[in-house]
């Protein structure tokens, strides 16, 4: 049976809820394989149609959302009037609360969010729209191979005109630090350890600190967003947490800590994109 493949069709940048680690930002590459008979054009499916239908659906329904493992017993969601309100209890003993418009979250019918459970959800969503000659569809999700340090972070950009305004979406990102023109892997590892599984928040979005938790909230074009999580899982910055500002923050912090040295920082936002800053 003829098969058609597209590797790295798109990248999912999102956050999800993990039973031990809590809120995790993630980036996965998406590969697709279709099998079936040939159509009148002699194709299983036109590549242009793959980009139009498959990539568009994945980008709209899964990308830049908070993915919820609906079979996990520590998750309780209360949808109401187009809003999703949820409490999530980790197995390590802390709680996260999240409130947003429903289009900012994605339900995964599984106990845990993994590349396989998300791939199954994508296939289920895609199959009804496939032409009759397509007999099978396989989605593979996988993280970028990174030689060096990386970190998982979540954030929200209230001024963004697109889906980055959602308060809990994120990325798995690598970091390149050069000190005086030479790569400094020890500084990369130190910074990535500092931002391991972190929520990077704009200080002006902090509404309250109470009982060891921060409550963040803002109103954006898509609606009202709220997020409560432990103080130790957060890192506050004085700017919007765009990758440009984060690259500058890292470079300036390093320059302040190591006077007399020049730093050049490549901060990534997921896969193959990011910002460069010097200090």
Image (cartoon, rainbow, N blue to C red):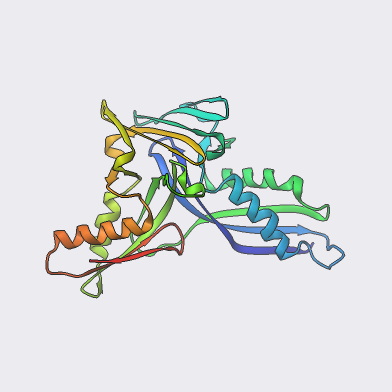
Q: In this view, does 230 lie to the left or right of 63?
A: left
Residue displayed at 42% across by 57% down: 269
> Farthest residue in the right direction?
40
Q: In this view, does 41 lie above or below 75?
A: below
Decide if residue 35 is on the left or right side of residue 225.
right
Marks counted in the figure total: 0
User: For the point 22% across and 60% down, which residue is it?
Assistant: 252
Nearest to the observer: residue 223 or residue 243? 223
Q: Which of 139 and 212 is in front in this view?
A: 212
Residue 61 horizontal/vertical position (percent): 60, 45
Residue 250 found in image quarter: bottom left
Q: In which quarter of the image is residue 98?
A: top left
Give the farthest residue toward the bottom: 181
Locate residue 36 relative to residue 11 in the image: left or right: right
Compared with residue 184, is residue 198 higher up or lower down, i.e. above or below? above
- The vertical placement of 40 against 209, above or below, is below
Q: In which quarter of the image is the N terminus?
A: bottom right
Name the spot of residue 100 as percent of width and height, x first: 49, 34
Quadrant of the rendering where the C terminus is positioned: bottom left
Q: Position of residue 109 (x, y in %)?
A: 59, 35
> In this picture, is 120 found above or below 174?
above
Residue 112 visible in the shown view = no
Give the left or right position of residue 55, taking residue 278 as reference: right
Residue 227 in sight from this viewpoint: yes
Instruction: Pick the residue in front: 121 or 269.
Output: 269
Q: Where is residue 131 in the image (x, y as percent from the top left)?
A: 80, 53
């Amino acid at each position: 049976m003829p098969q058609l493949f597209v590797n790295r069709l798109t990248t999912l940048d999102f956050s999800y809820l993990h039973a031990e680690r809590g809120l995790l930002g993630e980036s996965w590459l998406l590969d697709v394989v279709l099998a079936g008979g040939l159509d009148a054009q002699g194709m299983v499916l036109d590549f242009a149609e793959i980009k139009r239908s498959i990539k568009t659906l994945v980008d709209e329904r899964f990308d830049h959302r908070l993915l919820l493992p609906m079979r996990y017993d520590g998750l309780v969601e209360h949808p109401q009037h187009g809003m999703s309100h949820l409490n999530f209890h980790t197995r390590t003993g802390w709680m996260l609360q999240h409130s947003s418009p429903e289009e900012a979250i994605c339900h995964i019918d599984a106990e845990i969010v993994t590349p396989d459970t998300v791939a199954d959800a994508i296939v289920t969503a895609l199959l009804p729209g496939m032409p009759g000659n397509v007999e099978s569809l396989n989605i593979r999700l996988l993280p970028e191979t990174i030689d060096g340090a990386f970190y998982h972070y979540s954030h929200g950009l209230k001024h963004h005109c697109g889906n980055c305004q959602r308060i809990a979406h994120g990325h798995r990102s690598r970091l390149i630090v050069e000190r005086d023109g030479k790569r400094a892997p020890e500084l990369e590892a130190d910074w990535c350890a500092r931002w391991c599984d972190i929520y990077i928040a704009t200080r002006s979005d902090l509404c309250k600190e109470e009982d060891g938790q921060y409550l963040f909230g803002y109103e954006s074009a898509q609606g009202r967003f709220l997020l409560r999580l432990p103080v130790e899982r957060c890192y506050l910055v004085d700017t919007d947490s765009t990758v440009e500002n984060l690259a500058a923050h890292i470079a300036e912090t390093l320059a302040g800590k190591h006077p007399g040295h020049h730093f050049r920082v490549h901060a990534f936002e997921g896969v193959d994109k990011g910002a460069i800053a010097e200090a």
